Amino acid sequence: MARAIVVGAGPTGLSAALALARSGHEITLVEMSERAGGMAASIEIDGIRVDLGSHRLHPVAAPRVENLFRELLDDDLQTRVRHGRLRLGGNWVAFPLRATDLLTSLPPAFAGRAMLDTLTGPIRTRRSTDSVDDASDTFARVVGTGLGPTMLDEFYGPYAVKLWGLPADRLAGELARRRIAASTPGRLVAKVARSLRREPMVFRYPRLGYGQVVDRLVDACDDAGVAVEMPQQVRSIDLSDPAAAGVTLSDDSVQTVDRVVWTAPLPALAAAVSGVDTAPTASLRHRAMVLVYLVFEGPAVTEFDAHYLPGPDELAARISEPINYRDGPDPDDRTVLCCEVVCDVDDDVWNAPPDDLGRRLADDLHRLGVTDRTPSAVRVHRLPHVYPVLTPESLGPIRRVLDWSQGLDRVTVTGRQGLFVADNLHHVIDMGLEVADCLGHDGSWDSRRWTSALTRFDGHVVED
């Protein structure tokens, strides 16, 4: 039996702690906040269970992750038909994209330019075969080469500014590769063509909200004997002893462990570690998000689960209606719209009073024809670190810090925060489960298997 401490009680940390404990190891899980789950948690707004943004479970999860979902949720794991829409070219189109809807809803000029881009895709691809360095490998180049200038100018370019606060030609191409699954005309056409099949596009969702996954993981960790300590922080990690790692916590207790599994932000690890070479420095900026929950009296505002708003004219980037994601114990006399407003910490949006944000969003909803109803209440939840801003200039320092962290003896770095990724829930849970497969009962670490897993993680593309 090995002893390990898992830092961070998000989905990766929880799944790692659970799998390690079930493998027979002695596990402590520490979390600096009073609640597990991070952005995967759910909260209650006026009697309705809501998520921290729009989330869903995708049917492409690895079998072992799907099996874990089934174990944790049982009959509460629901299969739902996707029913969203996207504001594109001044019109609403179905999202995920559907062939028939694109033919009838897109403005002819937009559709014509997009079709021309599709036909000329092979030419752009041949022109881009030359190798590029980090400076020229930009979000704009990846999208412009793959999908063409129309999708760049009309959709992904404005959306990039909205999410990351920078023009597409100042963002790293890695962002586009990790965030856009249909990154070429062929892939986009194939994705749209799937809508012609009789089977509807579906997603999985817990009856009690997305955070039910986290809640059940916490319960399972407790049942497996994991010592869960919240709120608790890691003050320092001493790696000077080659036989074990000494971890000092914020309550001055010290744990001697065979392995530290780190899923918290990487800069905090660099500040905590001693007894090894000093970590390289890297500055990574994050965009923040203000979640504005608009409460409406009466039934659902619309039939849609989510509305995507990539353009600059609307304050929110996405609006979702939680009760349309599930068949759950929701009240009949009210509903909530969750509006995701991306901003920077301490800017005008971040500091705006809830009623001001509510009025601006209600005006957008009226103008777009989403609803003419007036919200009865406005609730706000602020998240300071949501979208990591990767630029060509930041990639080198970030890679050096990642290389340093992966070279630490007795420390395993993984998860969204540790690996600087924005992966789906099924991706990061798979990362946590993989940790248990690499730790031996004698405390040994299968570095070859972990290196192979990291390569696999690098291939993750976010499902939307």
Image (spheres, grey):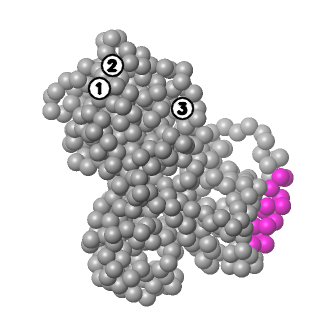
Image position of 399 (left or right of 147): left
**Category of crowding for the residue at label 3, using alpha-carbon neighbours closer than 10 angstroms: few (below 14), some (14–19), many (at least 20):** some
Q: Amino acid at mark 3?
A: Leu
Q: Which of pointers 2 and 3 indicates the residue nearer the eye?
A: 2
Name the residue beneath numbered marker 3: 454
Name the residue beneath numbered marker 2: 1
Q: Secondary structure at mark 1?
A: strand
Q: Residue at x 72, y 55 (%)?
A: 187
Query: Mark 1 near mark 3, Cβ–Cβ under 8 Å?
Result: no
Along the viewing direction, whichever of 364 and 69 lies nearer the viewer: 69
Q: Which of pointers 1 and 3 indicates the residue nearer the eye?
A: 1
Which residues fall within the magenta stretch?
Answer: 110-123
Task: Give how far across and how far down residue 415 sits, in percent.
Answer: 44, 39
Sequence-first disc among 1 and 2:
2
Which residue is situated farthest in the top direction here? 242
Q: Marks 1 and 3, Cα distance to the nearest angstrom?
A: 25 Å
Task: Give how far across and how far down residue 62 sits, in percent.
Answer: 55, 43
Query: Mark 1 near mark 2, Cβ–Cβ under 8 Å?
Result: yes
Task: Give how far across and how far down residue 44 sits, in percent.
Answer: 28, 65
Q: Amino acid at mark 2?
A: Met
Along the viewing direction, whichever of 75 and 60 lies nearer the viewer: 75
Q: Amino acid at mark 1?
A: Glu
Residue 26 tag number: 1
Task: Give how far across and how far down residue 197 sits, in percent.
Answer: 71, 65
Q: Residue at x 47, y 32 (%)?
A: 434
Residue 83 tag number: none
Query: Mark 2 near mark 3, Cβ–Cβ under 8 Å?
Result: no
Q: Can residue 433 be seen here?
A: yes
Q: Marks 1 and 2, Cα distance to the nearest angstrom?
A: 7 Å
Q: Can residue 309 be seen here?
A: no
